[in-house]
Amino acid sequence: MGFGVERNKITVLPMGITKPSALPKFKKEKVPTIIFVARLVRSKGVEDAVSVCKILEKEFPDIKLWIVGPGEESYVRKLKNKVQGLRLEENISFFGFVSQSKKFELMQKAHILIVPSIKEGFGLTIPEAGLMGTPSVAYNVEGLRDIIKNNGLLVEPNVSDLANGIGKLLNDKNLYFEMRTSAQTYARTLDWDLTAKKGLEILSK
């Protein structure tokens, strides 16, 4: 609409996700574990994820934060210095770049995916984690509010609300189970064959 295209001439195709050939069967960690999966750049909010871990440590002393993804060496060093300064070395682990199979394994073992990006085109990691039975807590920003349905929680973009959202899921077993189930159900609907079918239907018209 903003570019002068009439609404009735716009069709948004459903996205798909590339699913593993066989779903892993790992159990959730015994201690509260949140996972961050993205490139380690400022816009992805990884520093907020570290700050959230510090807030949650007060209520969950054994909480773990897994940081998964590659980044520039200088920025990763800055992040690790922040972790050390907050005395979270026992709580936070850096995995760097991992294979697809390892990514899905970690997603399945973790309890919650944390997504503190300030903007996204399509939050791919949210349905990927959902497929593994892991709901998300994400900032209520463009790209993320479109992919979070009943598969997670949207919060205002600040570390306090993000920590509160994660704490809410960790403390409410019924809500967490509901979110886990919904996350898997929703993720299974994102199929590339359906995307292609919808696209061909539009083109045929």
Image (tube, rainbow, N blue to C red):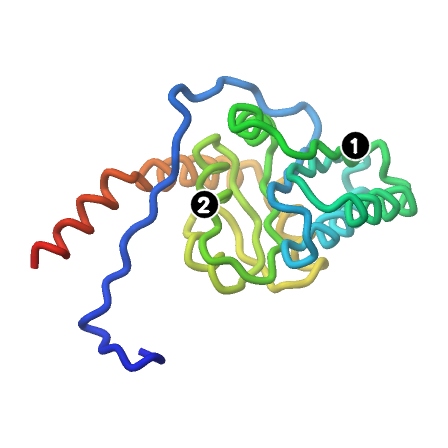
Is 114 drawn above or below residue 102 in the view shown? below
Of the residues under marks 2 and 1, which one precedes in the sequence? 1
Question: Observer-nearest residue: 163 or 49?
Answer: 49
Q: Do the residues labelled 2 and 1 touch (CB within 8 Å)?
A: no
Tell me where residue 45 sits by quadrant.
Answer: bottom right
Task: Tell me: 86 left or right of 108.
Answer: right
Q: Position of residue 102 (x, y in %)?
A: 57, 24
Q: Where is residue 110 in the image (x, y as percent from the top left)?
A: 61, 31
The label shown at residue 151 is 2
Q: Report the quarter where the C terminus lies.
A: bottom left
Residue at (59% x, 24% y) in the render = 28
Question: Observer-nearest residue: 171 or 112?
Answer: 112
The label shown at residue 88 is none
Residue at (92% x, 47% y) in the render = 85
**Mark 1 surroundings within 10 Å by alpha-carbon count, few (fewer than 14), some (14 through 19), many (20 or more):** some
Name the amino acid, label 1: Asp
Task: Tell me: 148 left or right of 86.
Answer: left
Is 109 drawn above or below residue 172 in the view shown? above
Q: Report the quarter where the N terminus lies.
A: bottom left
**Mark 2 surroundings within 10 Å by alpha-carbon count, few (fewer than 14), some (14 through 19), many (20 or more):** many
Is 114 drawn above or below residue 104 in the view shown? below
SS type, badge 1: loop
Which residue is the site of mark 1? 62
Q: Position of residue 95 (x, y in %)?
A: 70, 31
Q: How far apart are marks 2 and 1 (CA)?
A: 25 Å
SS type, badge 2: loop
Name the amino acid, label 2: Asn
